[in-house]
Image (tube, rainbow, N blue to C red):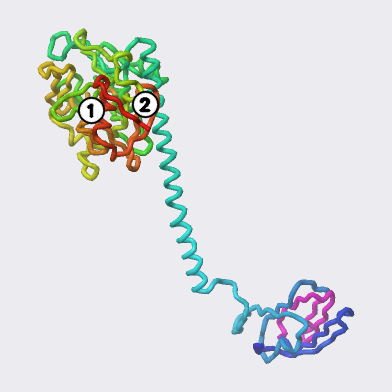
Amino acid sequence: MENFLATKISIRYNDTRDGFAANSSIPEEFILRTNSPAIQISSTSAFQFSRVVTHFLEVAIADSAFAPSSMPFVKFNALKRSGCKIKSRSRCALTLVELLVVISIIGLLSGLLIPAVQAAREAARRMQCHSNLKQLGLAAMNFESSYRYLPGPTMNAHPKTVSYQRDAGLFVNMLPFFEQNALYESIDKNVPSNSLPNKSKIEKSPSLLKCPSAMESELLVDLSDRFSGPSVAGLQAQACDYSGNDGAYISGKAHFGTIRLRVGSVVRERRLSEVSDGTSNTFLFWESVGERIWFSRQVSIPMNEGASATFTYLIELDPSSALQSTTRASTKSYLYSWSGFRIGTVVGGAINESNQIGEPFGEHTGVVNFAFTDGSVRSLSQDVDAAVVVALATAQNHDSVDME
């Protein structure tokens, strides 16, 4: 037991239940508290307490020697006073070993919980992407019920003719069918969708066209207001994260899909009855993120920097009828912006390899989401056989796929 420095004080412990009294030497400047209902303290300084009731006795030390063991009926706790050095066996903090154990347990729990939380969040984002594609599929079905053909981008005439004056993108034509009628009515239909009169309407894409797992779609600047036209200063529009199914291109041969570009009276949109491969076996929309141009899963650059100077859009199987854009501004305007054509092609059957021409490319781990022409939405692994992807991208290739 420790030794305490003290002066002479007489203590009487009066408690009839214990029948005990003791005298000892304790400091003069003490605060004494005990379970006893009555304590009397006397000293040369007439220091006195009465009827102090607590759970233990606290002692503050001045000088001289005192052994608490002389009062075994009380519990002492020393309170430090100026000039006194007191050792106490009681602790109010963790040891270093205990602290390290606690930190290691917290680290272990974090290592287990954080991946689970991230996986749950990604599952929620993936379901939201499913929902977006579902809404686009339902909008396309409602469009078809109204017009008797599936939606698609439109041009009033071939761009090489003097009659060419206006055009509209796939999703611009669909706006009234996914609760964006006010935006649709505000767009000037007598000029191309991507033109200065519509600048304030196209700068931000509707939220339905954004995948929650992808980064913010890039804002494309200095777009063209005519197919294969020059850039227009200040004309800008946001890219989006979904594309319509224009078909597949494999082994040098084109296979058309469900979304067709109307070019005046030369080419019209696809009728639902013309999807002879079956609506449940044919893509309608898919993910194709608009955050950057991805040349591969590891290599990407901003769309404004990486847009090709030329791209060709095949409107008929005869290559001589193809629409060819010869400016980078036109590529950004018609191929990448949400208000442009926004139709993509499967190249070689690959998934998650590139999005240069609107191919299937998503930010979900290992899969890409697809909306089918029957209105269903399914996820396909990026490792699925290329022949299966090509078959699902074509509308009239007379093939069938078992999706089970």
Q: Can residue 385 be seen in this view?
A: yes
Q: Residues within 10 Å of mark 2 (few under 14, many from 20)?
A: some
State the residue at coordinates (36%, 34%).
379
Q: How crowded is mark 1: few (under 14 residues within 10 Å), some or many (20 or more)?
A: many
State the residue at coordinates (36%, 27%).
371
Amino acid type at image mark 1: Thr
Above or below, 384 against 285 in this view is below
Residue 11 position, x and y percent, is: 80, 85
Query: Is residue 97 toward the left or the right of residue 361 in the image?
Result: right
Instruction: Please identify the dominant SS of the magenta region.
Output: loop
Q: First in sequence: mark 1 or mark 2? A: 2
The magenta-colored residue range is 27-49
Q: Mark number for residue 298?
A: none
Residue bearing mark 1: 345
Query: Is residue 61 toward the left or the right of residue 402 in the image?
Result: right
Q: Mark number for residue 206?
A: 2
State which quadrant residue 303 falls in: top left
State the residue at coordinates (34%, 21%).
279
